[in-house]
Image (cartoon, rainbow, N blue to C red):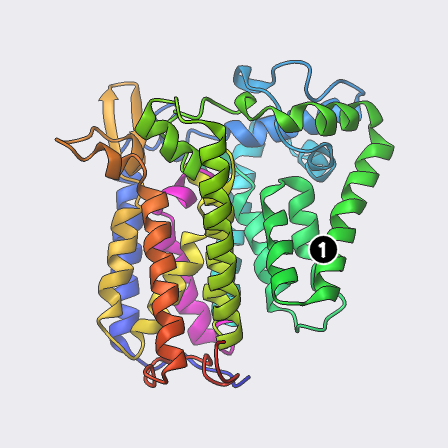
Amino acid sequence: MRSLQIPRSRATVFALSLSAVVAVTLVFTTVDPWLKKAGILAGGLDVHIYREGAWRLLHGHSLYADETVGGLLYTYTPFSAIVFMPGLVVPAAWITDAFLLVNLGVLYACVLMSWRLLGYRLTPRLASVAALLALTCVFLEPVRTTLFYGQINLVLMLLVLWDFSRPAGSRLRGIGVGVAAGVKLVPAFFVVQYLALRQWRSAVTATAALAATVALAWLVSPSDSRQYWFSTFFHSERIAPDTEPANQSIRGVLAHLSGGGSPVWLWLLLAGMVAGAGVAIAVALYRCGERLLSVTLTGMTACAVSPFSWGHHWVWFVPLLVHLVHRAQTRPGWWIAAALLVIATGAWTYQWTPDFASVGVFVLPKPWHTEPILENAHVLVFFLALGYGLDVIRRADRGLDHTAPTTSLLNGSCR
């Protein structure tokens, strides 16, 4: 695979500098940064839950029997509590700010890794462009909410991106997916992609890594492991009701449209169809050489078919934005698509009272007849992305896309 370089384009630097300034300004001005439960500098709830989970595991207390910080239940795997152990070294008063800085660093690493998956050479120029793009991504709702809550989504995405950046025959390929799935089960969907790509070693490695996380947690805390895998795992209602507007999944869409009365079989049918279509498109894209778009659509598909996907699970909009900026290097019209993605998935806020504000398109007040669209915004963007993926495959098969700075045609037909 040839290495690409960011063109010496003043337009690219200007556009990303402007978007970075606008994004950071919006994050700090659309709502008071210190407003409790909404301000970007007043969050950290989830990282405190992670820290308490680690404390409970260390002191022999049940992870799942009682409520944690904020009256919320612990919903992650027992292995996750082992992963969160280093958080106990950081004083509770500092953990919010410390993990905010970690997440910002991980966000930057995700953007760099996305450029690497596109075939770009890591240079100082690329590092600067990636920094500007990472700052732009701060305003994306999934990223902004991940930073606010101190969520783990960006870290898990980085593990997956690192995995797919490895050579197909690498012995390490699969470990990232397996460990990520050991913390939060949704990344296990990437094992399906490995199998569909017939990358048997990677699939086996990922499965073995996941199994190792389960085994380690079972040795450390057999009671929590039994509780999780034989009970907690099957109760998604511990998270929130399906009708929650922030549930941006197919099951959430059905609940939003029906008021929560849609049958489970309908969700299973639709989720199965979407999962099959998503994997098929991702595999075809991968065989075209479109590695980043392939793994991005798989990550988005996993969010869509999951029983419950909070808005912050959709951090896969980050590599999608990188892909669109990549396309814009030779076709300026793609800047419009990139801007529309930021607008559609931005952390737009609405302050209902002096003490409370909601963040995200799906929880904004709904103008006349727009609720089915706005309330399911992330899922609708996902379906548009699937359609775009199909178009990329079609154009590559016909040899129509000669101008994009991509390696997509180096591997021959997408079929």
Residue found at the far left of this picture: 368
Establish if 198 lies above or below 352. below
Look at the image and give the residue range highlighted in magenta: 117-146
When asked about the image quadrant of residue 66, the answer is top right
Q: Is residue 341 above or below residue 260?
A: below
Q: How many marks?
A: 1
Give the overall secondary structure of the magenta segment: helix
Q: Find residue 233 and report its horizontal and vertical position in percent.
A: 65, 29
Residue 158 visible (yes or no): yes
- Where is 12 relative to 220, above or below? below
Q: Where is mark 1, residue-wise?
A: 206
- Give the camera-side residue of 67 and 306: 306
Residue 92: name its quadrant. top right
Quadrant, the N terminus: bottom right
Quick check: 38 left or right of 204? left
Residue shown at the point (31%, 56%) measured from the top left: 20
Check disc 1 and give the amino acid type.
Ala
Q: Nearer the viewer, residue 201 or 45?
A: 201
Check residue 318 for magenta coloring.
Answer: no
User: In x, y percent, where is residue 49?
Assistant: 59, 26
Residue at 36% x, 42% y: name it: 141
What kind of element bears circle 1? helix
Q: Is residue 141 magenta?
A: yes
Residue 249 in view? no
* Picture residue at 24% right of the left edge, 26% below the top: 351
